[in-house]
Amino acid sequence: MSVGGIPYLLLRTANGNRYLPLVGRHSWTVGRNAENNFVIPDGWISRSHALLQFTESSDFYLIDLGSRNGTFINGRRVGVPIILSDGDRIAFGQTELEFHYPTSPKATNRHLDVSETQTAALHVRRLVSVMVVDIRSFTILTRKIDEQLLSNLIGDWFRQAGEIIRESGSWVDKYIGDAVMSIWFHEADNSITNEEVIQIFRAVSDLNKMTIDLGNRYPLPFPLKIGAGINTGFAMVGNTGTGDRPDYTAIGNTVNAAFRLESCTKQIGRDIALGESTYNYLSGFGNAQQRFAEHAVSLKGYEELTLTYASTFEELDNFLLDKLLWDHDLLQ
């Protein structure tokens, strides 16, 4: 088969090479389910495993959609959207493909009929957990310390926060002033495990410990603290930027509520607030009711009261210890 100037994925099989042309649209999903653009019957591949996105700047982005076993490029696991290069080896589960891209972007644009003014749009509905973490009393802090000290402090905090979040299987989706937003992708069939939620909790706990330690190392007028909101639900995962400035993020009520939940922690005097759906995924663990108190809160922009389950960082750490002891007892 001749593919000429068309970008494509190459899958080598026992029955010969299989060419998957990347033409006619701007995004392609890969997975086991039949609704994917490229269906690969590999038991190690998730139902909705990954997505390729073509932007008007003639780049192809590869995005892992929270797959169980990960997506690898040239042997390295990727957790954030990454630009593909001609000849890259992509591994989904136990299946490896090669990415091939013509050397002439203009030729590719003609095949894909992408206008120069078009914003490359991606619309994938995904089950996600969104975490928003905010530095408390940051505005007051900006008025009490000099700009250089503030710059060093916030730079250190963002850097260390990014490392913690990456180790937990996500990435910092947005830096917003004195806050960060992170997204964890889940399987599309609602099959979130307790451990996936616990992984997010561990990240929040580590962020709190890092913040306290960082605050102790700087000459600050008061202790450095954070608040956190976590919400789980469906969101549209997409590129909200233009081709030359892609901005992959999640949008929708699930995301908005995560920001509002973080804000409400100040009203109810707690450090962390969970959306009801996030809390429900802990229903199989009995001690959750002891560590998270139910509150009916009024969130900005929401007409009706919203149920949240809130806790302090001390109680969160106790919950994680409960879980550790619980798992230990199960193994005995």
Image (cartoon, rainbow, N blue to C red):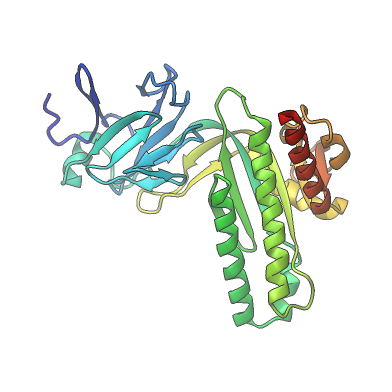
Q: Is residue 229 left or right of residue 36?
A: right
Residue at 40 percent across and 30 percent down: it is 93
Q: In this view, does 9 lie above or below 200?
A: above
Name the spot of residue 39 as percent of width and height, x first: 37, 21
Q: Nearer the viewer, residue 57 or 325?
A: 325
Residue at 76 percent across and 38 percent down: it is 323
Q: Which of 86 and 196 is in front in this view?
A: 196
Name the spot of residue 37 as percent of width and height, x first: 36, 24
Residue at 57 percent across and 69 percent down: it is 155
Q: How many discs appear?
A: 0
Query: In this orientation, does residue 294 appear?
Result: no
Q: Which of 102 and 205 is in front in this view?
A: 205
Which residue occupies the extreme front position in the image? 332
Residue at 78 percent across and 31 percent down: it is 285
Q: Nearer the viewer, residue 298 or 42?
A: 42
Name the spot of residue 134 as percent of width and height, x first: 69, 58
Where is the C terminus found, in terms of image quarters?
Answer: top right
Q: In this view, does 238 lie to the left or right of 141?
A: left
Where is the N terminus found, in terms of image quarters?
Answer: top left
Q: Is residue 54 above or below residue 218?
A: above
Query: In this orientation, does residue 319 appear?
Result: yes
Q: Quadrant of residue 100?
A: top left
Q: Is residue 263 left or right of residue 153?
A: right
Name the spot of residue 120 as percent of width and height, x first: 38, 41
